[in-house]
Image: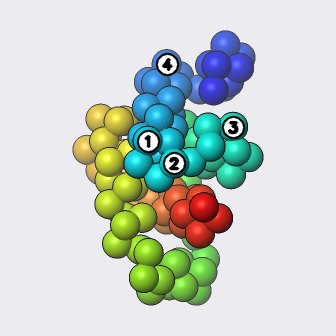
Amino acid sequence: MTILLNGGVISQVAHDAALNASQLLASEWNVDLHSEQLQMAMTHFARATDRIINNDPIKEGLDSDIFEEISSDCLFTEIESMNKKICAFTNIELIPEEENSFLLSNLYAIKINL
């Protein structure tokens, strides 16, 4: 995240939110902070944070069939709960559904690979 911050790719707000989210995932789900899946998820989270802050969120979310598969999984309630905790680090009142669908899918990928 520091490389992205220093390169001007993400803001300080996004950087801090992603670091806090990483620490939360490490403490609550025992996720390896150096895992490729976590790094990818946090990069997307940081970029999504900046897009939303800049009023330029993505227009299309995750494919509806894929999202339906994720949302019907028995882990979804836990994933959704973690997503709410992570999104709270951004201080953004409302995360657009399109962005949120990808955040949830990244958390799902992390959770099923633990």
Q: Please report contact status of discs 4 and 1: CB closer than 8 Å, yes or no.
A: no
Q: Position of residue 78 (x, y in %)?
A: 37, 67
At horizontal 50% and vertical 42% (from top left) the residue drawn is 26
Q: Which residue is mark 2?
A: 30
The figure's colour scheme reads rainbow
| Disc 4 element | helix
| Disc 3 element | loop
Amino acid at pointer 1: Ser
Q: Which residue is mark 1?
A: 27
Would you say 94 lies left or right of 107 here? left
Q: CA distance from mark 1 to mark 3?
A: 14 Å
Mark toward the start of the polypeptide (4 vs 1): 4
Q: Which residue is mark 4?
A: 12
Q: CA distance from mark 4 to mark 1?
A: 23 Å
Would you say 52 lies left or right of 11 here? left
Q: CA distance from mark 4 to mark 2?
A: 25 Å
Q: Position of residue 27 (x, y in %)?
A: 43, 41
Q: Please report contact status of discs 2 and 3: CB closer than 8 Å, yes or no.
A: no
Q: CA distance from mark 2 to mark 3?
A: 12 Å
The one of 77 and 43 positioned closer to us in this rendering = 77
Amino acid at pointer 3: His
Q: Position of residue 42 (x, y in %)?
A: 58, 41
